[in-house]
Amino acid sequence: MRLFAGIAAAAILAAACGGPAAVSTPTPTASPTATPTVAPTVANVFKAELKASNETPPITDAEASCSGTATVTLSTTSVKFDVTITGCPATTAINIGHIHEGAAGVAGPVKISTGLAAGDLTLTGGGVTFSKTATPAGPPAWDAALISAIMANPAGYYVNFHSTAHGGGVIRGQLSKA
């Protein structure tokens, strides 16, 4: 009986207050969304320790002192190269740089170019730091399948920078997870 009395009292109270309030649901308004950008993640960032001794054959002249690092950020729409080169003789001219397919000690074909051209860099005190971004159009052209292959087997690819004195490459390093 008390339960019935409680329900009746609640009904009377609701009626006295004008009944239950109407609940309105706001209509959401569409707002523009930003175009997503590819952020570097552990999965798509790789490093290469660049050494003259990694070249095939190893560099043994004055440019053997050259070394550096390359951080390579891969995506299907761009490949970004962040590079530091140090220890080179004052006369060294770094002309081009690429990712090649090939295991350590094996020369392989160019797969992705940095876009660096002769005369683009000036070494100061034997070194330089720069960034370059490649796109799938190349040259050479590349696609998502190549990016997937590099990500699946980074040790099967190397970063190589070429100098005037060493057209085949002066510093080289296999890719590895950053």
Image (tube, rainbow, N blue to C red):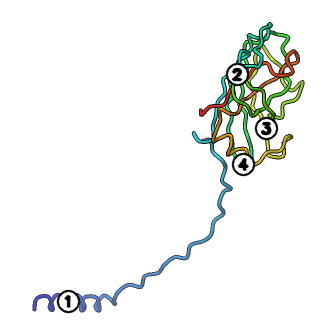
Mark 4 or mark 3: name the one nearer the start of the chain.
3
Q: Amino acid at mark 4?
A: Ala
In whole angstroms, how far apart are the C-alphas of marks 1 and 4?
68 Å
SS at mark 2 in the image: strand
SS at mark 4 in the image: helix
Residue sitting at 65 percent across and 35 percent down? 154
Disc on res. 7: 1
Q: What residue did someone put label 4 on?
A: 145
Q: What residue did someone put label 3 on?
A: 111
Q: Mark 1 or mark 2: which is in front?
A: 2
Q: What residue did someone put label 2 on?
A: 50
Q: Amino acid at mark 1?
A: Ile
Taking the image as shown, residue 111 lies to the left or right of residue 21, namely right
Q: Nearer the viewer, residue 176 or 120?
A: 176
Q: Residues within 10 Å of mark 3 (few under 14, many from 20)?
A: some
Quarter of the picture containing the C terminus is top right
Numbered-mark total:
4
In whole angstroms, how far apart are the C-alphas of marks 3 and 1?
78 Å
